[in-house]
Image (cartoon, rainbow, N blue to C red):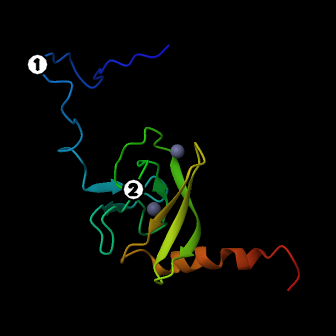
Amino acid sequence: MSHSSFRSDDGPSDDSCSPFREPRRSARPSYLKCRHCGLEFSLDAPGTRHRNHCPHCLWSVHLDDTPGDRASLCRGGMEPIAVSVDPRGEWHVLHRCGTCHTIHLNRVAGDDDERALLALAVRPLTRVPFPV
Ligand SMILES: [Zn+2]
Ligand SMILES: [Zn+2]
């Protein structure tokens, strides 16, 4: 059974508020605490407008349906599983949600940990499934 009416669970009933206002726009946090390693990091990062992964361990949280929209209700932890490079030479991190298994591609930020990125990039080479 699903209710489509708008309800707020975070306080006493406030009938004076319009249900059509956007509740989270002004309250968007500028810092996130990494669930994986505990680091607190700024969402304002060099090289990207939509940082959503930890610059230290590269883990992310499933917040977006499309980058930056914060529209997903999943909130699952997203594991960095691979690095991809686009034709312009820009690196992206692939994240897979541990809850719903969605995969997202996120551009790396200028202050992402370089060793973590390299470790992720060479990970398949450390476990080659055939003799070389
Ligand atoms: Zn982290
Ligand atoms: Zn998810």
Q: Earlier in the sequence, mark 1 or mark 2?
A: 1
Residue 80 sits in quarter = bottom right
Question: At 41% across and 52% down in the image, what residue appears?
Answer: 66
Q: Tell me residue 128's x, y (percent).
A: 79, 76
Distance, label 1 to label 2, CA atoms, is: 33 Å
Q: Tell me residue 31's x, y (percent).
A: 28, 56
Compared across the picture, whether 129 is left or right of 46 comes to: right
| Front one among 128 and 6 | 6
Residue that carries the numbered disc 1 in the rendered image: 16
Compared across the picture, whether 7 is left or right of 1 comes to: left
Q: Mark 2 and mark 1 in contact (Cβ < 8 Å)?
A: no
Element type at marker 1? loop
The quarter of the image holding the C terminus is bottom right
Residue 47 sits in quarter = bottom left
Q: Quadrant of ligand 1?
A: bottom left
Asked if residue 24 is positioned above or below residue 109 in the image, the reply reads above
User: Residue type at mark 2?
Assistant: Pro
User: Residue type at mark 1?
Assistant: Ser
Q: Tell me residue 125's x, y (percent).
A: 72, 79
Q: Is the CB of the residue bearing disc 2 within 8 angstroms of ligand 2?
A: no
Residue that carries the numbered disc 2 in the rendered image: 67
